[in-house]
Structures are given as C-alpha cells and as structure tokens.
Amino acid sequence: MTPASSQPVPAQKDAPPAPEAKPQVYGSFTQDTLVSLLSAELAGQRNRFDIAPDNYVTQAIKTQDPGVSERAYQIAEYMGADQSALDTALIWARNAPGNLEAQRAAAIQLARAGRYDDSLVYMERVLQGQGDTHFDFLALSAAETDPDTRNGLLKSFDRLLGKYPNNGQLIFGKALLLQQNGDSEQSLKLLEDNPPKEGEIAPILLHARLLQSMNRGKEAVPLLEKSIKKYPDDKRLRLTYARMLVEQNRMEDAKVQFSALLQQYPDDDELRFSLALVCLEAKAWDEAAGYLEELIARGAHVDSAHLNLGRIHEERDDPQSALNEYAQVGPGPDFLAAQLRQADILVSNGNGAEAAKRLSEARAEEPDYAVQLYLIEAETLTSNDQLDRGWQVLNQALKQYPDDANLLYTRAMLAEKRNDLAQMEKDLRTIIKREPENAMALNALGYTLSDRTTRYTEARELIEKAHKISPDDPAVLDSLGWVNYRLG
C-alpha cells in the first residue's frame, strides 16, 4: 500500500466535507501542528490533494487526536488511499472508543485489508453499542478469499450469533459466506428459517439469487412479486425481478417492469438501454427504436444505440437506413460489429466494391483495428461464396502482417475449402512453430489430416497434443473421436 501523498491527484474533486452531526473537537496543539493542519485544510479547499492528505495523516499519527484522525480518515478514504484510510481509522477508533462511527470505520477498513478477525472485533463493538453494523460488508469482502479463511469467518459469525441470535446483519452475513463456500442449500435454509425484518431488502435479493442459481427460478418469481408489492419503490427488487424475467425469456413481462423502473427513474440511461434491448428481444421494433433514439439524443450508449437501430432497420428490410446507422458507430466495443454488418449488407447485395472501399477507409482511419477489418472483409466474402476474392484479401493482409496467427489460421481454413491442403498445412504449421501450445491450430491440422488424408497416426498425435492443452474443448473431443474411428 502507498501513503496518501502518493495517490493520484483528481483535481476535479472538491474536498470531502466535515461531518455534519457535530463540530470537530480538537485538542491543544503545538504551533507546528496548527500550521500543518491549517495548510492541509486550505489545500483541501483548493483541491490541492497532493498536500492535504499527507499533512493530515502525519498529524493524526503525531497527535493521536480523534478529531484530526477523523478528518484524516475522511480525506484518505475520499482519495482512495487504502493504507492511510486504514491507519487513520485505527487511530480514530483507538482514541475515541465510545464513537460508533470510529469503530465502524476501523471495521470496514480492516475488512478491506483482509484482516477479517480484527474487523469482527470492531464490528462487535458497534453491535454492543446498538449501532448500525456492516457484517454484510465483511462477508462480501471475503468473497475472493480462500475457503479456509471463509470457514474461519463462519465460526466467528456462529460465535456472535450465539450472543445475538436475532441480528439480521449477522444472519445475512453468514448466508453470504455459505453461498460463497458453495453451500447454497444451507444458505437458503438459513434465510428461510429467519425471514427478513421490516425494511431488510438484501436478504430477499440473496434468497432470489440462490433459487435462481439452483435452477429454481420459478420459485423466486412469487417471492419477488410479493416483495415488490410490499416495497414498490425499491429499485433493487424490481430490477432483480425484471432481469429474472429476461432470464426466463418472459420478455413482455420484463418490458412492463423495466418500463415501471424508467418511469420511477427517468434519468437512468442504463435502465433506458436495458428496456430498449428487452423491446428488441420482444420484437417490439417501434418501441425499441424510440428508446434508442432517446439515448442518442441524451448522449448515452450512442454507439450501441446506432448499432441496434441498424439491426432494427435490417429487420424492417431497409438496408440503406441500416447502413446509415452502422456508419455512425465509432471506435469502441461496437465498432467491429457495425463494420461486419455493413460489409455483409453490401456484399450480399452485390456491392462488394463499396464494402471493400469502406473497410479500406476504416483501416486507414483506425489502424488499431486493421487486422480485424481484414478478417471481416475476408470472412464476409467467403460466406457469400466469393472464395477467390477472400483469398486475395488475406494474402494482401499477410503481406502487411505476416506473423498474425488469426490471419494465418483464417487463410488455412480457406485453403482447405479451396482444396489446397498443402497451403493449409503450411499456414497451420507456421502457427504451431511460433505457438506450440496453440490448441486450435493443432486440432485443426489434426482433424483435417484425419478427414482428408490417410495420415491418421500423425493426425492423432496432433489432436492428442491439443487435448492435453484443452481437455474440455468440444471441438478437440470431437476430433479425438473421429481420428480414433478412422484408425479403427
């Protein structure tokens, strides 16, 4: 961990506010300490986060003052300075033993640092003071730990449950730990034996997720429906319900729920995008287009909106409008999909020259995508039975990128379609020489040799190598069965 002063300086942020509940109470300080604290506070007000955290942390350590350490903790947490947040939270908790906020801060920071047993000590102090505990955060923090650590935590939770058997946070935290340990049945039983108290939403959500993960999603639906009637304004409940309906392919019902959510949260563009996708799945083209156009107007999910509007126009048999939408998709996650759809529309409509022109322009404008754009062009031509043109494109690409394994593999597969087995083998062996662990190339060569030649023993050796690298790959398993059949 690094000290607060070494953290990045986000100049756009304002200084974290001091607590509103009560004014800070500081002790008597030396002149040097006062100067340092004043400098830190002024630096924070001026967004000079390269100065403020370091001064506050230094003075928190030096003075052991609860007020100083609280302010230091606030700034360190705001800055994402994990080690400084932990150090100052512990100083604050140690020097303000009756302050439940201080004890909770220490518990949370210890959990973040993976010191779960120490975290429980502080969390129990909050529980004893009848404060708001965060045992759920502690359990969630342990999600990536090893099973032994989680088992140790489970024992600690059981110990505390022996003292506080009706504490909802402890019950929920234990249920989370059981789920993380793969014991869904016990987690579910614990939740069913201890129904959530009024206002407790998280246990309901976990209950529903557990049922879904156990292929009992239909049981989760009435649970969520009942909960939504009780808490109609809870976003998490309705969103979980809506997503579960999507997973169960109940698109019309999901559309109703996402529409209700968007009415509640009209500025939430994630909901608007989700609703657009649900409408697409439900083939409600007009509704989907309306939401996608709203997203573009709002400047949210713009590329994805153009991509999906293009798909809608294709469904409506309006290729020119689809091309117009795809052409507006910029570099990013949706760029290649848009380029592929443009190429396919143009080539399938006999306008391969325009497709080649657009892809060439795209390669010039976005050189980072050049190889993928060559592959799109070649595969589009090949899928439209223009094998010779696809072959020319791949040869052109390999002159520029002779070491690219994807280009070599694609040319090898096209060579096999052209009955040029010598070229196919040459390209695949080039890949294997450079990447001996390339299971896809090993398997492709082995399968083709077993299927198109009588070199069965050599083919099996190649496929067995691929199998050692990727033992669960269905394509490799299929090849292994085929070569053994050929060998008798």
Image: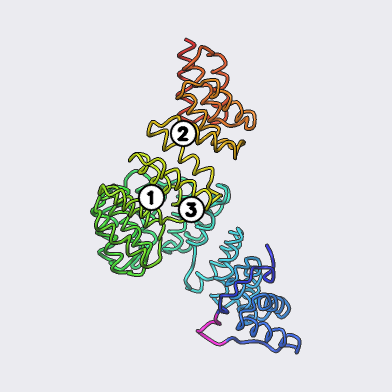
Q: Residues within 10 Å of mark 1 (few under 14, many from 20)?
A: some
- Please indicate whether residue 107 sits to the left or right of residue 354 in the image: right
Give the mark nearest the N terminus, 2 or 3. Answer: 3
Give percent across and percent down for residue 338.
41, 49
Residue tagged by mark 2? 390
Residue toward you, 5 or 444: 444
Give percent across and percent down for residue 384.
37, 34
Magenta span has 18?
yes
Give percent across and percent down for residue 335.
45, 51
State the SS at label 3. Answer: helix
Residue tagged by mark 3? 177
Of badges 2 and 3, the one in the foreground is: 2
Give percent across and percent down for residue 403.
62, 36
**Relative height, residue 484 to residue 234 (above, below):** above
- Please indicate whether residue 301 sits to the left or right of residue 279 in the image: right
Identify the residue at horizontal 31%, vertical 53% (top origin).
321
Residue tagged by mark 1? 210
Q: Residues within 10 Å of mark 2 (few under 14, many from 20)?
A: many
Q: Amino acid at mark 2?
A: Gly
Q: Amino acid at mark 3?
A: Leu
Identify the residue at horizontal 27%, vertical 64% (top origin).
260
- Please indicate whether residue 107 sits to the left or right of residue 265 in the image: right
**Relative height, residue 308 to residue 45 (above, below):** above
Which region of the structure is painted magenta? 17-23
State the SS at label 1. Answer: helix
